[in-house]
Amino acid sequence: MRLEISALTTLPEVRRGDDLAQLIREAASQEREPIDGSVILAVAQKIVSKAEGAVVDLRTIRPSALAESWASAWDKDPRLIELILSQSKRIVKMDRGVLIAETRHGFVCANAGVDQSNLQANMQANTLANTEDDEFATILPENPDLSAQRLCAALRCGAVIITDTFGRPWREGLVDIAVGVAGLEAVQDCRGSVDRSGRKLAGTILAVADQLAAAAGLLMVKSGGFPVMCIRGYEWRAATTGSARALIRNPQDDLFR
Amino acid sequence: MRLEISALTTLPEVRRGDDLAQLIREAASQEREPIDGSVILAVAQKIVSKAEGAVVDLRTIRPSALAESWASAWDKDPRLIELILSQSKRIVKMDRGVLIAETRHGFVCANAGVDQSNLQANMQANTLANTEDDEFATILPENPDLSAQRLCAALRCGAVIITDTFGRPWREGLVDIAVGVAGLEAVQDCRGSVDRSGRKLAGTILAVADQLAAAAGLLMVKSGGFPVMCIRGYEWRAATTGSARALIRNPQDDLFR
């Protein structure tokens, strides 16, 4: 029982309009990393957003009074705050300079998934001068599950997980989680199943796609420039579609909404 | 750049007083899984607690009025509730049958880390009859960092992470996290560091030990009976001791305390 994660290291800088599946296919082929139905691909949200053009020029944004006031209180860019508000369907917490929001997809995270380009300049091979780079931010893909499905279909791999890096209450540091899923059950209910020894798996409901994202994130975030990971050796529960929405807690069951 | 996780599959049922390092050494040797300074071992809390005798006979517990009242409202075992209260230094949330507490170590989790044996009967090779098994519960190790240090020293591996399975606000499903750490920096501050291409890693503070725990948990929880994983190929930042306490958010910075 062995799981293996390997980075694609030759993927070029991704730009708006790029065929991301094609770029991944070429990199995999060059690196002799066969991609087939046994492989789960983990892909950083950042490059999916870039390929899909989910990048916003802050110079086009007119900040609201709320954005101006919060930005001025906490020394932030008011246009960035306005963009964050525009990506939110609900503000969960706005305190001590931290803005935690529920995105239109239902994800609860800092800054509604908005990332200023220069915060991850490492993922841009040919970064613009910093001054100009400050003028752009990525937002989450419109429909990350659909983005995952398209990649999965185009690459004929087993499953695709689109990952993003989120903070957490109570615990320090960021971890990678799944914002888009195709080809696998994002959450697996192991209650009542039986392991190979015939013993009953008392288990529990496992956030499998988040654990896969975290595993991939170990190499992804650390290495900076490697936003695509191949995961092999993990036996997953296939799903005809699959969705990261299964990872979002039902509001009625959420004690920390 | 390749990370590999493999399960030790021949570890016997762990019992109170067992020399866990010795059991792991024997299993690794039998399976030809060399354990050396390049290996990070992930070990499930459950077997550490068992070896250390952090197992409580519920028949010795006299429930308080609070435990009786909560148990009766939510159809729980009042002795188990009392044990959970005794393991808590603060109740974070007690609502809709869910009890989230801060343990004396500072971890915030459901049931203060108390696990009823029969909830994970899969980890017991020779389970007692269910009726008697219901009478026991494990608690977290007294000092999980120290438990990790001892295993690390005895096995001469690179690092040890003791993992437990926690739920999360906002997201469905459980993930594995680190409750004890030895030999690595549990949290890594990547700000200002530079990746191999010489680009600045804008990064962030990463919960590396939690990501390693999640990666190991993919095989651990799913397989049920395999509570020890060997992680190879991950370049970590060594620490003379290391501590899972670094993963606990400072109360002043915690918006969801």
Image (cartoon, coloured by chain):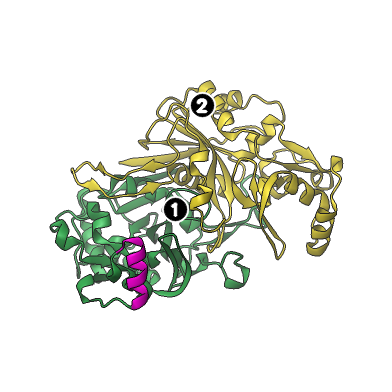
Chain colours: A green, B yellow
Q: Is residue A97 magenta?
A: no
- Viewer-closest of B192 and B237: B192
Q: How many C-alpha atoms fall within 10 Å of the one at disc 1: few (<14), some, or many (≥20)? A: many
Vertical order, B59 against A105 (above or below): above
Query: Residue A161 lies in what quarter of the image?
Result: bottom left
Answer whether residue A69 is magenta in the image.
yes
- The answer for which chain carries disc 2 is B
Tell me residue B37's x, y (percent): 42, 25
**Residue at the location (35% across, 49% down)?**
B204
Residue type indicated by callout 1:
Leu
Magenta residues, start to end: A65-76
Q: Which residue is mark 1?
A: A212
Which residue is at 72% across, 30% downward? B16
Q: Secondary structure at mark 2?
A: helix
- Given residues A124 and A256, the one toward you in this image is A256
Q: Quadrant of residue B11?
A: top right
- Residue A45 % position (x, y): 33, 62
**Local secondary structure at mark 1:** helix
Q: Which circle marks residue B224 in the picture?
A: none
- Is A122 left or right of B177, judged from the image as shown? left
Q: Is residue B246 above or below residue A67?
A: above
Q: Is residue B95 left or right of residue B63?
A: left
User: With A222 as the anchor, is B179 left or right in this view?
Assistant: right
